[in-house]
Structures are given as structure tokens and as C-alpha cells.
């Protein structure tokens, strides 16, 4: 899924697969009973839930494709490699909206038929959602660091301290919200919504998420600094659209992972405030992709006229 | 290709950098190659008028802010003045 020209094709295929799965796979009995839904009503409700996700994914993919097109147009320039890294990071985030959702629906459907698989489906889905920011933020951070190093700018001590403080606040609140699900359990017990013992949850989920978020926040800071230090009135205007778009995308992505991981997945459709919150955050993040697309189109135009 | 003409190309790029940043060099090279059918380093003071006209058209496609276009082309026209060229 790397070539921009193929991205929309892959998106269409994946969307059709997603819709077919949503229509064909058996309804979850727990959710059907909870909301008093017939089989067809359950599928209709499921469609309504996944349709906005598909639309948002489309806009996200459109945004990263435009950035990748620009990065390809300046392939042989010194900053070309760094923009490619930014575009690749955005690509992971954009596909990270849709691909894990498709895998999740498959795993949960297997768990519907084989209840013994339920815990494995939850754990597998949680790890899948973790891989996306780890890879995406690492790529974006490498790109933003490369771009900033060209301006010979360095992070100021005061701003770095502020960044650390923000991360500590986010991290402590995150740990509190995760650990409250473990109250009353022993350290090795898997009798919790995450189906992981606390020590394993800490090492393989909490720490990697905090690391990814720190890398993401650092990238945000570097991107904004780079866009402010860049020369060229018209270039800077376009670059700032990309930079602020990336800021919104990264911040939205962090917020999405935050909500997604502190409210444990149940493995079936749940209509609650968490679902509403994730859609609001996704909507904001997609506004970021639109900014990226607008900025990238303007930057590419500078390379074409 | 004389020394002042090489300087002229560099000075056009230097002014352009204020508007197009790191894309300036590529932008000017493209305008010279595509519209004047010359190698960028072969740009001479005789070409400047035509180059500015093409730059005006190109930059007008990038921004609707006429003040920026005017400011940019005015600075480029300054290069055509003899006193500047000699420096």
C-alpha cells in the first residue's frame, strides 16, 4: 500500500471487504440482546457505525496521498527524503484507521462463534492498534528531525521541559485510568478487561504507548519549529498548512489511542460516550488531513509552475 | 557566459528565495529552461525582461495576493538597473 496511485484502489477494495464482512458475519448475541435488536437491525446499526469511519478513512488517505505526491516531486532534493518519511508516517496513521477495524471485526466474529477465542481477539486487536502509532510516530519523528536539522535550529530547554511536563501529565493520568481496571486483582491475574496480567500490560502496552506519544509530541514540536524557521513567504504559507495539519493529525491520533486504550474493548458493538468521543476525535483528525492535503497541493504547485 | 551573468542568476535565485524558500533554485531553473530554452547558468541581462514576465505569470498561479507578486517582480526589475548589475 505504498504507491499513491494504488492507494485509492486499495481503499475501495478494503471498504468493500469491510462492508461485506459487516453484512455477512453473524450478529453478536450479547449486543443484540443489550439493544433488543433483530439480526437485520443489528447489521443496519453496524453499517451506520462503520460508514463514518470509512468516509473519514477516505479523507485521511486522500491527505497522505497528496503529501506523498509532493514528497515524490522533490525526491532528489535534500528535504525530499524527510518529506517522504512524514508522508509514510501519515500513511500508517491513515491506514491505521481502517485496517485494524477490518481485522477487529474478523477476530470478534471468530470470538462470537468460539467464545474461548474472545480474550485472544481482544489482546490481538489491542496490540494491532498499538503498532500503528509506534511505526507512524517513529517515521514522522525521523522526518521532522531531519527537516529541523537543516534549519540548524535546536529545541530550546524551556520548551523541552514543557514537553516533558505535558508527557508526564498525560502518562500519569493514563496509568491511573488503566490501573483502575486492575483494582482487586493480583499482579498475574488476567481477569480484567484487557485480558493481560498487569506486569505484561505495563511492559507491552503502557510503556510503548507512552513512548509513541512522546515521539509524536516531539515530532509536533519539531514540525512547528521547522515551518516557522523556513524561508519563503509562499513556501512557508503552504508548509504551515502541512505542519498544522500534522499537528492536528498527531494530536488527534494520540487522543484516539488514549480513549481507545483506557476504555477497554468489549469485542462487540457498544453505543456509548466512548464511541461518540472517538468519532469526534476522528473528525478533528480528518480536518488535519485536509489541511495536509491543501498544503501539499500548494507545495507541489510551487514545484510544477 | 560571463561572470556578471552568473551573478545575475544567483541574484535572481536569492530574491526568489524570499518568496519560495528552498524551492527557489528549482523554480528559477525551470522558468529559464522551459520558457527561455536556456541552461540556468546561461541567463543574461537581456533575458531578464522575459524571465520576469514568465515569473509573474507563474507566481500569479501560486498566490492571489497581488502585493506579493508586485513586490517580487519589482525587486527582480531592480536587477536590470545598470548600477546594481555592476556591483
Image (tube, grey):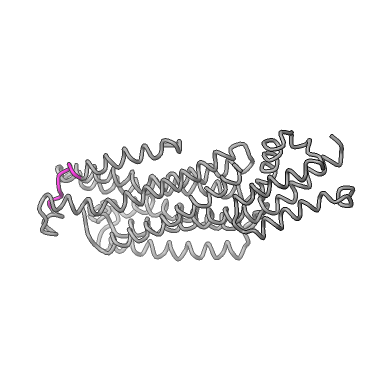
Check the picture and name the quadrant holding the N terminus of chain A.
Answer: top left
x and y, in percent, of residue B24 in the image = 68, 46
Residue under the image location 45 percent in, 48 percent down: A63
Tell me if residue A186 comes above or below residue B7 in the rendering: below
Q: Is residue A95 left or right of residue A264?
A: right
Nearest the viewer among A139 and B48 is B48
Compared across the picture, whether A119 is left or right of B3 comes to left
- Looking at the image, which residue is at 73% across and 43% down? B51
- Tell me the quarter of the image containing the C terminus of chain A: top right
Q: Quadrant of residue A154?
A: bottom right
Find the magenta span and give its range.
A23-29
- Looking at the picture, how far across and down is residue A117, in whole percent? 20, 43
- Is A235 within the magenta? no
Residue at x 17% of width, y 42% of height: A25
Measured from the top left, where is residue A278 in percent x and y? 33, 59
Q: In the figure, is residue A118 to the left or right of A149?
A: left
Q: Is residue A27 magenta?
A: yes
Rendered residue at 82%/49% (across/down): B80
Q: Where residue A211 appears, x then y in whole percent?
A: 46, 53
Given residues A218 and A33, the one toward you in this image is: A33
Query: In terms of image quadrants, where is residue B45?
Result: top right
Left or right of A239? Residue A204 is left
* Up-down relation of residue B27 to residue A281 (above or below): above
Amino acid at each position: 500500500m505504498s504507491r499513491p496511485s494504488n492507494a485509492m484502489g486499495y481503499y475501495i477494495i478494503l471498504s468493500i471487504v469491510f462492508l461485506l464482512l459487516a453484512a455477512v458475519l453473524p450478529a453478536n448475541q450479547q449486543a443484540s440482546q443489550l439493544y433488543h435488536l433483530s439480526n437485520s437491525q443489528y447489521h443496519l446499526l453496524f453499517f451506520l457505525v462503520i460508514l463514518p469511519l470509512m468516509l473519514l478513512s477516505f479523507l485521511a488517505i486522500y491527505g497522505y496521498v497528496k503529501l506523498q505526491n509532493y514528497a515524490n516531486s522533490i525526491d532528489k532534493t535534500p528535504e525530499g527524503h524527510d518529506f517522504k518519511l512524514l508522508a509514510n508516517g501519515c500513511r500508517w496513521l491513515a491506514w491505521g484507521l481502517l485496517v485494524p477495524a477490518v481485522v477487529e471485526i474478523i477476530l470478534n466474529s471468530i470470538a462470537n462463534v468460539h467464545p474461548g477465542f474472545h480474550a485472544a481477539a481482544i489482546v490481538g486487536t489491542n496490540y494491532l492498534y498499538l503498532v500503528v502509532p509506534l511505526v507512524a510516530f517513529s517515521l514522522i519523528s525521523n522526518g521532522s528531525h531531519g527537516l529541523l536539522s537543516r534549519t540548524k535550529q535546536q529545541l530550546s530547554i524551556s520548551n523541552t521541559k514543557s514537553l516533558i511536563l505535558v508527557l508526564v501529565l498525560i502518562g500519569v493520568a493514563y496509568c491511573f485510568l488503566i490501573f483502575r481496571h486492575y483494582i482487586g486483582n493480583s499482579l498475574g491475574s488476567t481477569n480484567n478487561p484487557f485480558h493481560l496480567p498487569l506486569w505484561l500490560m505495563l511492559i507491552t502496552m503502557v510503556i510503548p504507548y507512552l513512548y509513541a506519544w512522546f515521539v509524536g509530541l516531539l515530532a509536533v514540536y519539531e514540525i512547528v519549529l521547522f515551518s516557522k524557521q523556513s524561508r519563503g513567504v509562499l513556501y512557508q504559507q503552504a508548509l504551515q498548512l502541512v505542519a498544522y495539519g500534522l499537528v492536528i493529525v498527531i494530536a488527534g491520533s494520540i487522543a484516539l489511542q488514549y480513549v481507545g486504550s483506557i476504555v477497554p474493548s468489549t469485542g462487540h458493538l457498544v453505543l456509548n460516550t466512548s464511541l461518540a468521543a472517538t468519532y469526534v476525535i476522528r473528525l478533528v483528525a480528518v480536518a488535519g488531513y485536509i489541511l495536509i492535503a491543501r498544503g501539499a497541493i500548494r507545495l507541489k504547485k510551487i514545484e510544477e509552475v | 557566459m560571463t561572470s556578471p551573468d552568473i551573478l545575475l542568476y544567483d541574484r535572481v535565485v536569492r530574491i526568489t528565495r524570499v518568496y519560495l524558500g528552498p524551492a527557489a533554485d528549482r523554480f528559477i531553473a525551470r522558468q529559464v529552461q522551459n520558457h527561455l530554452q536556456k541552461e540556468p547558468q546561461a541567463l543574461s541581462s537581456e533575458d531578464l525582461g522575459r524571465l520576469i514576465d514568465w515569473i509573474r505569470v507563474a507566481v500569479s498561479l501560486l498566490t492571489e495576493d497581488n502585493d506579493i507578486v508586485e513586490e517580487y517582480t519589482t525587486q527582480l526589475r531592480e536587477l536590470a538597473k545598470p548600477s546594481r548589475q555592476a556591483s
